[in-house]
Amino acid sequence: MTQQTWLMKSEPDEASIDDLARSGRLPWTGVRNYQARNFMRDAFRVGDRVLFYHSSCAEPGIAGLAEVCSTPYPDPTQFDPTSPYFDPKSRSDAPRWMLVDVAFVAKTPLLSLTALRAAPDLADLTVLQKGSRLSITPVTAEQWQRLAPKLGVSA
DNA sequence: GCCAACGTTGGC
DNA sequence: GCCAACGTTGGC
């Protein structure tokens, strides 16, 4: 299986690329959308590339690179009544929400949403489509080849 | 804070 | 299964 690429949104107030660089590795908690969960649960493979995207902040955009470093397992926050991600309808014998761990790879110069939108060869990125709110989206091999030089890395 | 777009819930 | 109401996302 060749390495796949995913764009994953995180609010830097909650988990930024700097937080990931500090800790080395983080569980991707808090996904409460079925489509995004299905990507992590069914399609993610250890070693897949992650484009770390900062959302809901002053300068939204791709801020770094990471890598999927675990197989899927239940998101512990769904069972924690003190967590904002607590889901009272999820049962421990049938967890509703799954996640993976993600490892830091590199910080990149910010490739801002404005810059992404200004690049004609990136117009087909799912995250740029009108109304797209999905926090995890697949990036094709072709899209990654066009993105990499803009992130200052080799594809 | 606004609001467009989308997802989920729940009554019927 | 329909669909209105509501909640959330996320850029601006």
Image: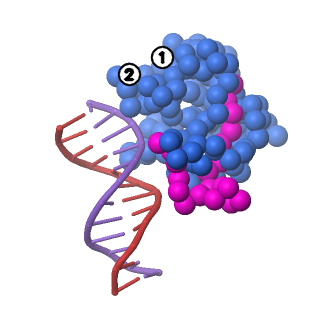
Chain colours: A blue, B red, C purple
Numbered range of the magenta stretch: A84-103
Residue A48 as seen in the image, left or right of residue B1: right
In this view, A49 is above or below A36: above
> Residue A103: percent from the left, percent from the top?
69, 25
Residue A42 as seen in the image, left or right of residue A19: right
Mark 1 — residue? Answer: A110
**Residue A56 seen in the current view:** yes
Q: Residue at x 57, y 34 (%)?
A: A7
Residue A98 magenta-highlighted: yes
> Residue A60: percent from the left, percent from the top?
41, 26
- As helix, strand or loop, the secondary structure at mark 2 comes to loop
Chain name for mark 2: A
Mark 2 — residue? Answer: A59
Extreme residue in the right direction: A1
**Residue A116 seen in the current view:** no
Q: Identity of the amino acid at label 1?
A: Leu
Mark toward the start of the polypeptide (2 vs 1): 2
Q: Residue at x 38, y 31 (%)?
A: A56
